[in-house]
Image: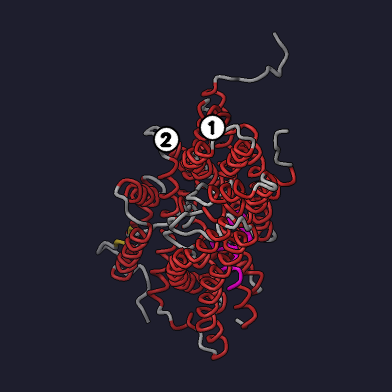
Amino acid sequence: MAKKISESTLKKSWLIWFFWHGCSQQGENLLGNAIAHTMSPVIEELYVNENTRKINAYKRSLTLFNTEQQLGAIAPGILCGMEEAVANKEIEPEVSNAVKVAIIGPTSAIGDSLWVATIIPLLITICMSITNMGGVFNYVGPLLYMIGYPILTAILSWSMWKLGYKSGIEGVQKFMASGTLDKITSAMTVLGLIVVGALTASYVNVTVPVTITPPGGETAAIDLDKLINSIFPKILPLLLTLGIYRLYAKKKWSPLLVMGLILVLALALTGLGYLTGAYAPAA
Amino acid sequence: MTIFQAVLIALFVYLASIGSVVGNTIGWYDLGRPLVAAFIVGLIMGNVPLAITLGLLLQLANLGSVTPGGALSWDLSYATYIGVAGALAFDNGDVTASIALMWVFSTIGGAIGVAMWNLTYGFDLICNRFATKGAENANPKLIAFANAGLGNIIGFICRFIPALIILITTAVAGSRSGVNVAELIPAWLITVLGTFGGMMAALGMGILLSFLMKKAWHFCLFLLGFILVVYFSLNTMAVAVLATIAAVIYYTAITGKDGKRTGREA
C-alpha cells in the first residue's frame, strides 16, 4: 500500500514552519536547519522501521534552502509531496534534490514581490489612515493590523502549503505559467502606486523657510514657500520623493546613505531659515 | 522609566526581531512594524497618543522596509522600540522635542540592531553542527533543539540583553537622576530633526516606488494619487477606495473576463 502523509502530520509540519522558520538562519544553509526541523514529522511518519532510508531523508532535508517565509510556504508544501513520492519509490531522491533547489527562486518571488512589497504596505496604510482619525482610533488602527495581519497570513500560508503538497511542482509551474499571478500582481501594483502618490502628498514635508522682504516694508514680504506652492502645490515633496526614488532605484544608494543626504538637507534648510530670519534666532 | 518597563520593552525587541520564537508573521512583520510597535510601547509606558504620533513618523519612513533573502539594512525592531521608548521616557509635554529625541534614539537603536543581527547570523552556525548530528542519527529532537532551541537562545541573548542595556543606561538612568535629555537638546537641533523627520517619509515612499514602478506609464498612476490629494483634497482612505476600483477595472481589462452579467438582458 502506498504511503500517505496524514492531515494532522501535515498540519504539525506547517506549524513548525510557521513559528520557527527563521530561528537558526545563517550564511551556510540559510533556512536549511528550519526545513529539516519542519520535515521531521513527515519523515518520521513516512519511514517507520526503515532506518537507513530515514537517515538519508534527514540528510536530504538538511541542505541549503531559502524562500519567503509566509506565502512561500508553498515551497515546503511541495517538499512534503516530494518526500511522499520518494518514500513510495515513485521518484529518485536525486530528483527531489534538484526540485528543492529549483523552487527557491520562484516561491520567494511570490512572497516577496506580492505579499511583502505590496500587500503589507497597503494593509499598514489602511490601518494608518484609521489611526489618524484620532481618539479611540489611535487604538483601533494598530490593533486591527496587529490581530488581522497574522490571522490573514496564517490562513493564506496554510492554503499555499496544501496547494504545494497537492499539486506538486508540475501544478505550481502550470499555475505560474498561466500568468494569473502576474496579472494579480500588476493589478495590485496599480492600487499600490495610486496610494503611494496619495501618501507622498499627505505626509512628505519639505518647506523652504525663506521670506524675502523688499526694502519697501513688511507688507510686501514674499513667503517663498507659499509662492512655490501656489504654482504647483506640494511640488517640493514630490520632487524629493522622485529624487530619492532615483538615487535608491537607479543609482543604487543604500537607505543609510539616503538618510545621510536627508540629514544634510535638513541642516541646510534650517540654516537657511535662521539666516533669512524665518526662525527666531537661537537664544 | 522603571526597570520593569525596560525589561518588557527589551522582551518585545527580541520578539519582533527576525527569526524570533513567534515566527516572522507574528514577529518581524507584525510586532516589528512601527505602527504596532509604537502602540505596544505606548501601552507599556502609559502614553498611547504620543507613542502613535511618533510611530506614524517611523512607519512612513520605513513603509518600504522589506528584507529579501535576509539582507538587512536597517533593524526596524530595535529602531522603533528603542526610539519610541527613549522619547517617551523623556517626555516633557513638548511634542517637537519628543520627535527629535525619537530620531536620535531610533538611529542609535537601529544601528546597534544591525550589528546584533550580524552577530546572530554568525553565531547561528553553531546550530548547524547539532542539526547535522541529528540528521546522521535520525534524531528529530536534536534537530528541533538545533533550530528552535539553540537558535532562539542565541537570538534572545543577542537582542534582549543589548536592548535592556541601552534602555537602562539612558531612559531608566535618566528618570532616576532626574536629568531630562529633552531639555539638553538645543532649539536649532530640534528644528533640524523636525525637518529631517518630515523628509524621511520620502525615503519610505521612494523605496516602495522602486518595487512598484516597473513601466514608464506607471508614473501616471503615482501622479494620479498625488493629484487626488493636492487638488481634490481627498484623504488617504478615500484614495485607497478609488485605487481599489481602478485595480479591479484594470484586472478585468487585462484578463479579458468581464464576468457574469448581473443585469437584465435587453
Subunit under mark 1: A
> Residue A220, percent across and down?
32, 59
Residue B23 is covered by the magenta coloring: yes
State yes or no: discs 2 and 1 in contact (Cβ < 8 Å): no
Circle 2 residues within 10 Å: few <14, some 14–19, many ≥20: some
> Residue A217, percent across and down?
30, 64
Q: Amino acid at mark 2?
A: His
Q: Nearer the viewer, residue B219 or A189?
A: A189
Q: Is residue A192 visible?
A: no
Which label lies toward us, 2 or 1?
1
Lateral position of residue B250 relative to residue A216, left or right: right
Please tell me in which quadrant of the rendered image residue B237 appears. top right
Q: Name above or below for residue B51 compared with residue B179.
A: above
User: What is the magenta range?
Assistant: B10-25
Query: Which residue is under mark 1?
Result: A181
> Residue A163, percent across and down?
63, 36
Residue A251 is covered by the magenta coloring: no
Q: Nearer the viewer, residue B39 or B78?
A: B78
| Quadrant housing the C terminus of chain A | bottom left
Q: Which mark is residue A67?
A: none
| Quadrant housing the N terminus of chain A | top right
Residue at 29% from the left image edge and 63% from the top image edge: A213
Residue extending furthest toward the left: A215
Subunit under mark 2: B
Q: Nearer the viewer, residue A200 or B67?
A: B67
Lateral position of residue B219 relative to residue A65, left or right: left
Q: Is residue B72 visible?
A: yes
Residue at 56% from the left image edge and 42% from the top image edge: A75
Q: Name above or below for residue B259 compared with residue B156.
A: above
Query: Which residue is under mark 2?
Result: B218
Q: Amino acid at mark 1?
A: Leu
